Image: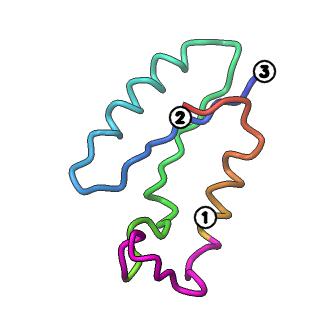
Amino acid sequence: MIDVAIILGSTRPGRRAEPIARWIYGIAGKRGDARFELVDIADFKLPLLDEPMPAMMHKHPAAYPNLGRKDRFLRRLRFRDARV
């Protein structure tokens, strides 16, 4: 049996990703040949667009806090056969 992660890929307020992902999950869940999991990137509180300077300024901090959250997110996806 294959494992598939359905990723909710938006963290914006008022995002529309969740109902769409749940709709896909509902349809996919009817299959008997795969396991599906919803993975919401908002749950991991990743450091997205939280840098003090825009990337185009090329002034990146020496260390980013919260990189452990990124590792938790990647571990959830690591052994999946597919990602949607």
- Answer with mark 2 or mark 3, whichever residue precedes in sequence: 3
Q: Which residues are magenta?
A: 53-68
Please tell me whether residue 80 belongs to the stretch shown in magenta: no
Residues marked 3 and 1 touching at CB (< 8 Å): no
Position of 20 relative to 32 (above/below): below
The amino acid sitting under disc 3 is Met
Q: Secondary structure at mark 1?
A: helix
User: Which residue is denoted by mark 3 in the rendering?
Assistant: 1
> Most prominent secondary structure in the magenta stretch?
loop
Q: Which amino acid type is shown beneath numbered disc 2?
A: Ile
Q: Which residue is mark 1?
A: 70
Which tag, 3 or 1, sits closer to the chain's start? Answer: 3
**Residue mark closest to the camera, 3 vs 1:** 1
Which amino acid, mark 1? Lys
Q: Is residue 66 above or below residue 26?
A: below
Q: Residue at x 36, y 73 (%)?
A: 54
Q: Residue furthest bottom?
A: 62
